[in-house]
Structure formats: C-alpha cells, structure tokens
Image: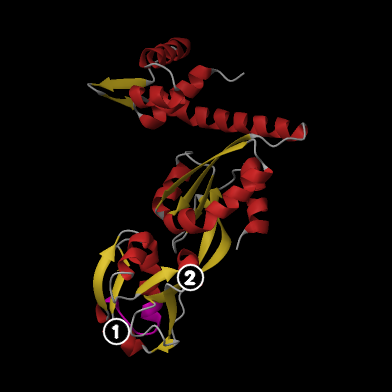
Amino acid sequence: MLDFRLQVFYTVAKRLSFTKAAAELFVTQPAVTKHIHELEQQFGTTLFERLGNQIRLTPAGEIALRHAETILGNYRQLQYDLSVLKGQHSGTLRLGASTTVAQYVIPPILARFHERYADVKISLVSGNTQQIEQALLNHDIELGIVEGRTHLHELRYTPFVRDEIVLISHIDHPLAQRDEITVDELKSQPLVLRERGSGTLEVIEHALRQIGVKLSDITVEMYLGSTESIKSYLTHSRCLAFISIYAVENELQAGTFRVLDVKGLTIQRDFYTIQRQGATERLAETFLNFAERQRP
C-alpha cells in the first residue's frame, strides 16, 4: 500500500548513505539508486546532491523528508488502528532510553509487554539523555525514557519512575558493617564515579552541593564510563561508589554489596517519558499505559 520508494528515500535521507540504506532495507544498492532516480523524475527535481563519496539533501530533499516523516508516521498509525479494530495489536514501536533505564529499568517491562502484545515489533536504542532527545526530534524513535534535569520545549516530559542513587561498598569493605557514615568520612574515602558529562554524575554533584560538598572535596580514584564497569571495579578495590538502586538490586539481594547511608544526604531523580509536542502515537500510548501498570 505504501510506496516503497518513499521508504527508500526516507532511509537514504536519514542515513545519508545509499550503501547503509540498502543494507537496512535488504535490497541492492543499484535498486536504491533506481528508486531514488524514479522519485526525482516523478517530482521533477533532485533530492540529493552528490559530493564525491558523500551525499546531502537538497532544499527539495529537505521538504520531501519532512513530508515523508509525516506520511510514514500516519501509515504506522493506520496499520495499528486497523489491527486494533480486528481485535489485534500489531505494528512497530521504536523506543529510546538513557543508559540506566535501558539496562536496568525497561527490559523486564519489555518482556512482559511482548508476552501480552506478541505481534508488536519493538526496537530499543540506548544513549545519553541528549542523544535520546535528539533521536526523538529526528523522528528516529516514537518514545523515549530519560534521566536529566534539563527539558527541551519541543518535547513533552512526563514523570515515569523515581530513582534513588545510593552509596555502595563491597561486602569486604571496612565500612560495610556500618549503616551510616558521616560527610567527613565520605570525603576521606576513595570513590569511583561515572564519567564527566554523564547525567548520573550531574545529579550526584547537585545533591552534594546541597549539603555544602563540592566534587573537589572528595577523593575520586577513577571515573568510569558505565555502571557495570563501576560494579566490577568495586569487587576488586576498596572504593565506594554512587549507583542507581535499580543497578544493584541483584548484588544487594546476593549480599555482594552493601548500601551505606550518608548522614544528611539523599540523592533522588526522576526518569521521564518523552514525546514530541503535539504528537499522538497510539501504539506508544498503549505501551505507556501498560508500563504504568508494570513499572517498579
């Protein structure tokens, strides 16, 4: 029903590569070139400029891309609405989530959603909050779930779930038998933290400032690029670390790690669902309604 040439154009326009578009659509590169040429003949204008081995959209191509996004979005909506009318739920839902959400919060919900709606195809991409926001603005995804303190006016943010960042130690750490430590003790202990620029580190810095502590006041042994690498590092060192409670549930149950409360310090943040302002994706709404009932 949908002109496949439009799908080809959209994929080339998003990837700015005939080769990548061909691989993604499971067609040959000459077939991609043929479809684009036919569209350009139909519209009487060029859609891409060829610059050696690279391409970019012409002004006409930019206009065509905006309309293609709308048409493809409407077509996805048509497919879903007709499937619901027949008592089914089918379609494609593209999700994006910031790293902590993608690793620890959303997978159990996705598994249960798939059990309930087996005919819905879901893809999930992960990245930092800014990357997920940009993917939504670029129409690469229909729904995002992110952390972060800044909001873009082009997007609609809805609180999804509350997270707590806790201070943890390995069970063999000298402080592991303590339920609470003081701020001065925190300053004297080596810590391993997420890398500069991460949303988690931003939240930690903000919370520490509320109790009069700067990041320069504490002893940072190392910055690491993922929560999993921090957890692994803790098992081989006498460091402490601030980590999302969702990321250490299994280790806390197994007794591998312990939570240490810091007197006067609470670090909480919200995860938000994000959608484009004015957009109504009913499959995304179906997922959100389901997730509301399933979330931790």
Q: Residue at 30% x, 79% y: name it.
A: 214
Q: Nearer the viewer, mark 2 or mark 1?
A: 2
Q: Which residues are magenta?
A: 207-215
| 156 sits to left or right of 241 | right
Q: Is residue 278 above or below residue 105?
A: above
The answer to whether residue 219 is magenta is no
Q: Say what amino acid the circle numbered 1 marks.
A: Lys
Residue 208 lies within the magenta run:
yes
Q: Earlier in the sequence, mark 2 or mark 1?
A: 1
Q: Quadrant of residue 32?
A: top left
The residue drawn where x is 37% and y is 60% is: 228
Q: Residues within 10 Å of mark 1 (few under 14, many from 20)?
A: some
- How was the colour assigned to the protein in this rendering? secondary structure
For the residues labelled 2 and 1, say whether their Cβ atoms are less than 8 Å apart.
no
Q: Secondary structure at mark 1?
A: helix
Residue denoted by label 2: 254
276, 246: nearer the viewer: 246
Write down the residue under mark 1.
187
Res 115 quadrant in image: top right
Q: Is residue 98 visible?
A: yes
x, y percent for residue 79: 66, 30
Pinpoint residue 286: horizontal percent, then vertical percent: 67, 46
Secondary-structure class at tag 2: helix
